[in-house]
Amino acid sequence: MKCDRCCGEMAYEKFYGPSEYFWGWRCIFCGEIVDTMILDNRKGFPSPSAVRHRFVKTPKYKGG
Ligand SMILES: [Zn+2]
């Protein structure tokens, strides 16, 4: 398993949430955490660039 951010080695570890624990990957270099649920969610997403243009432009405010 390689880290998305720094391509470092990731370690499979047990993490403790508010009410239960889960298993996930933690980068030993930058601390990035990826749990298995996040990985499942990513599979279902379309490519980020496909939805980017749907954001509404915010008007510019002059002065303040
Ligand atoms: Zn990393």
Image (cartoon, rainbow, N blue to C red):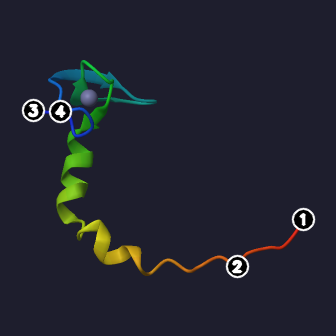
The answer for how far apart the CA atoms under marks 1 and 3 are is 49 Å
Three-letter amino acid code at the position of disc 4: Cys
Q: Which label's residue is closer to the chain start, 1 or 2?
A: 2
Q: Which residue is mark 2?
A: 59
The answer for how far apart the CA atoms under marks 1 and 4 are is 44 Å
Q: Is residue 39 above or below residue 27?
A: below
Q: Which residue is mark 3?
A: 1
Quick one: quadrant of the N terminus? top left
Residue 52 in percent (x, y) is at: 39, 73
Q: Measuring 30% from the left and 67% from the top, which residue is drawn there? A: 48
Residue 31 in percent (x, y) is at: 33, 24
Q: Which residue is mark 1?
A: 64
Instruction: Indicate yes or no: mark 4 CB to ligand 1 under 8 Å.
Output: yes
* Ligand 1 sits in quadrant: top left
Residue located farthest toward the front when viewing the structure as drawn = 63
Instruction: Indicate yes or no: mark 3 CB to ligand 1 under 8 Å.
Output: no
Residue 61 in percent (x, y) is at: 80, 73
Q: Secondary structure at mark 4?
A: loop
Residue 22 in percent (x, y) is at: 27, 31
Circle 1 or circle 3, nearest the eye: 1
Q: Is residue 59 above or below residue 4?
A: below
User: Is 15 on the left-hand or right-hand side of 61?
Assistant: left
Q: Measuring 24% from the left and 66% from the top, which residue is drawn there? A: 45
